[in-house]
Image (cartoon, grey):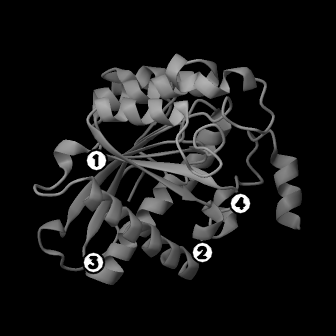
Amino acid sequence: GGAGAPRQAAAGGGGAAAGRCIKFGSLFSGSNLQGPILAAICSELGRQHGIAVAIDHQYTCEIHATKRRLGQQVEDARYAFVDADAMRHEKAYDAKSRKLVDIPSIDVGTAGFVCKTLSGENNTERGLASSCLRDRTGKTGRSWGMTIEWLKKHRPKVLLLENVVKNLLSARGGSTLNWAVLRNDLTLAGYFVHPLLLNPSTFGLPQHRPRCYIVAVLKTAIPLGRDINWVSSTLAQFRDGMSQLMAERPTPLGRFLLDPDDPDDPDREAISILFQR
């Protein structure tokens, strides 16, 4: 289908889940790897369980034009929003139509909020690192504030967050002030919260760096009789299943690179050299 058209990920039965359409959107989308990952998950549901799930990629939100173009090459969403701070409202500017449009509701959301203040690499904001989420300071703190406001306004049933481990969790995976603030903010917004420490390279993605992934599930979306222990057990099964899936079906590196002949790409020459190699 065209841009933003729901894609049927798998055919089969699955009872009440069969034919389900998942509406998906992301904040701080970057190069938009989230779309193909969700497609892989849905494909595996069809392969292992015969559940047909369609993906309706509603929107990305990324301020950098080059990343937006790359993201549209990887997975072209219906809308390409620009300003994460505007996502707390009913409407936002769409770079594709160049209009102010309604922000659609979604079932699943992702947000890789800015890591600058937390990171140990090229960090000019180290002095803010230990309390940036609480104080909403630095690029990380401000982007976390935007994420929470977006979440409270649009309330996806499932949210996946991602960031560096440093200054978020301790060296042994324990709590820090930033983690306590993050968990409390999400809990007050009505979500169960569960962290996962993972390395993207395990899943066939072109990054070798341990990351902290936080899964938040809206409490009102949890089936009756289930609790956070059920969420944790389900996520552990998801992690193991995804490891097996991506090991079997690695994603080609070329899918994450811009077209070397794109005349608008400032890195065209460097990318051309990489392709020649």
Residue 176 in the image: x percent, y percent?
Answer: 55, 36
Residue 91 in the image: x percent, y percent?
Answer: 34, 22
Give the spatial CA distance, label 2 vs label 1.
Answer: 26 Å
Q: Quadrant of the C terminus?
A: bottom right
**Mark nearer the N terminus (2 vs 4):** 4
Query: Disc 1 marks which residue?
Result: 107
Give the spatial CA distance, label 1 vs label 4.
Answer: 29 Å
Residue 98 in the image: x percent, y percent?
Answer: 47, 26
2 or 3: mark nearer the eye:
2
Determine whether 94 is above or below 193 in the image: above
Task: Determine the secondary structure under disc 4.
Answer: loop
Q: Is residue 97 visible?
A: no
3 or 1: mark nearer the eye:
1
Give the spatial CA distance, label 4 vs label 3.
Answer: 34 Å
Determine whether 212 is above or below 66 in the image: below
Query: Disc 4 marks which residue?
Result: 208
Pick the residue in front: 185 or 79.
Answer: 185
Does residue 193 appear left or right of residue 264 in this picture?
left
Pick the residue in front: 133 or 270.
Answer: 133
**Mark nearer the N terminus (3 vs 1):** 3
Q: Is residue 160 visible?
A: yes
The amino acid marked with disc number 4 is His
The amino acid marked with disc number 3 is Ala
Query: Disc 3 marks which residue?
Result: 11
Query: Disc 2 marks which residue?
Result: 250
Q: Quadrant of the N terminus?
A: bottom left
Residue 121 in the image: x percent, y percent?
Answer: 78, 39
2 or 4: mark nearer the eye:
4
**Mark nearer the N terminus (1 vs 4):** 1
Give the spatial CA distance, label 2 vs label 3.
Answer: 22 Å
Within 10 Å of the Cα at label 3, are there few (<14), some (14-19), or many (20+) other Cα atoms? some
